[in-house]
Image (cartoon, rainbow, N blue to C red):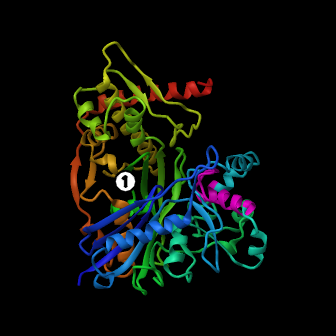
Amino acid sequence: MADVILAIDQGTTGTTVALMDASGRLLNSVNHEFPQYYPQPGWVEHDPETIWTSVLKGCRALFKGRNPTSTHIVAIGITNQRETAMLWDRDSGKALNNAIVWQCRRTTEFCQSLRAAGHEPLVKSKTGLMLDPYFSASKYRWLLNNTQGIERRLKQGKVAAGTMDAFLLWRLTGGSVHATDVSNASRTSLLNINTGQWDDELLSLFAVPQNILPEVRASSAIVGRTKGVPGLPDGIPIAGLAGDQQAALFGQACFKPGEAKCTFGTGSFILMNTGANRVNSEAGLLTTIAWQLGDDGPLQYALEGGAFVCGAAVQWLRDELGLIKNAADIEPLANSVVDSGGVEFVPALTGLGAPYWNPDARGLLCGLTRGTGRAHIARATLEAMALQNADILLAMEQDLGSRLKPLRVDGGASVNNLLMQLQADYLGRKIIRPNAIETTVAGACFLAGLGVGLWRSSAEVSKVWGIDREFTVNLPPKKRAQRMAAWQLAIQRTQLSSDHGG
């Protein structure tokens, strides 16, 4: 009977449950979506019970037709949407309200008030993060201020708080373990990332009592065992926990400082390993904890930057402009022309993310002529996806003070060969696409496998990580510099239009 690892990848729109064997091969995976709730403009919520149901459905579907006891599950790894926050009852395990999703902006005014009062330098120095409703702390505060009967429950010690990993761990262990890992905790604005512990000054600033928060544990270590989970035997060690982007970094085997990955999804998320060295960004990036291997292991750090619109730009061409019928159509259409014909597209459809951080910026499509066609706009869209990532990665090099190693890519759009070649050309670095682009799942499995000794070191994990294709740089440095200069002019025009109210 072969050893396998069960991964739970709890995402923003659905939950994937998967099995991996000791060779690093994904044997099977299933995904179940769940609804999003928008009670007010800018508010986003999830029902934790439907999320838990999606996990159970995934496990049942994965083992359909066979008894899970006939499969030797050596460990479970959990990875999850980050920053999403919730409260639940310690006795019943029931959620006290809907979870507030990372995308939710309901605490914007509160965060602005803290910034106006001069608290952002403190928050950034201790957490590596900006004062923004994106992160969990202000969400916890809102829940504590807006949950009926919370005062009584707090006095009775019945309130538990956590991000989605902590909630799933609680449910999987029958309510016996209330814990999170350092990577998820580092996204709350309540953890001092220098010490890896909850910080009293930050807890006071956001008015969050520490006794409702989970214990902070390593990303790879046995934190609990299954108990009373329908469809799973009791006693399976849960040995891997990590936020989804950190899990993807680990799943890409980016174990050395300077190694980075880019996940091409709705947006693009780029993380660079900086090792045991916490790098404080001067270029508009975030500093975060990447992982900790073993409870006594050193904290490992990363720089992070994200572009809000990546694959969403292709969806916009399809759904709003009708230029393509399917997302996959963009590659052959863009490949039908040799360049964008002078067309420039800045996809600031929801503002500009790192390294510019301009929420008021708006999208820009310029350089149109009578000869401009669908293919030129499609090509400009792919070029923009690559150029905005190059901006982030070059900022990372500036912060790190050293040259980037080859960039590893994953996510749905990474199958687009033209986009990957453009990324190599505009970044001026080799692009590496792995055999398995489900790197978030892979990272959860690798962390869990290390936690139970299936692999003894990250070096052994590297041996089971494989390359599908490499994209080498074809653009001469002079032409790259010219292309980046034209892109920067377009960025400046986008910023200028926001400064003048559009």
Can you give x and y, in whole percent of width and height, for residue 211 in the image? 69, 75
Q: 212 and 167: which one is in front?
A: 167
Q: Verify whether residue 302 appears in magenta.
A: no
Could you tell me which quadrant the C terminus lies in?
top right
| Dominant secondary-structure state across the stretch colored magenta | helix
Residue at the far bottom: name it.
235
Left or right: 94, with 331 as reference point: right
Q: Residues within 10 Å of mark 1 (few under 14, many from 20)?
A: many
Disc 1 residue type (three-letter): Lys
Residue 340 in view (yes/no): no
Can you give x and y, in whole percent of width and height, for residue 133 in the image? 63, 51
Can you give x and y, in whole percent of width and height, for residue 4 in the image? 30, 77
Residue 334 lies in what quarter of the image?
top left
The residue drawn where x is 62% and y is 48% is 105
The residue carrying mark 1 is: 261
Task: Give the total of numbered labels.
Answer: 1
Residue 262 in view (yes/no): yes
The residue drawn where x is 29% and y is 82% is 71
Q: Give the extent of the magenta segment.
A: 124-146
Residue 207 lies in what quarter of the image?
bottom right
Q: 371 and 16: which one is in front?
A: 16
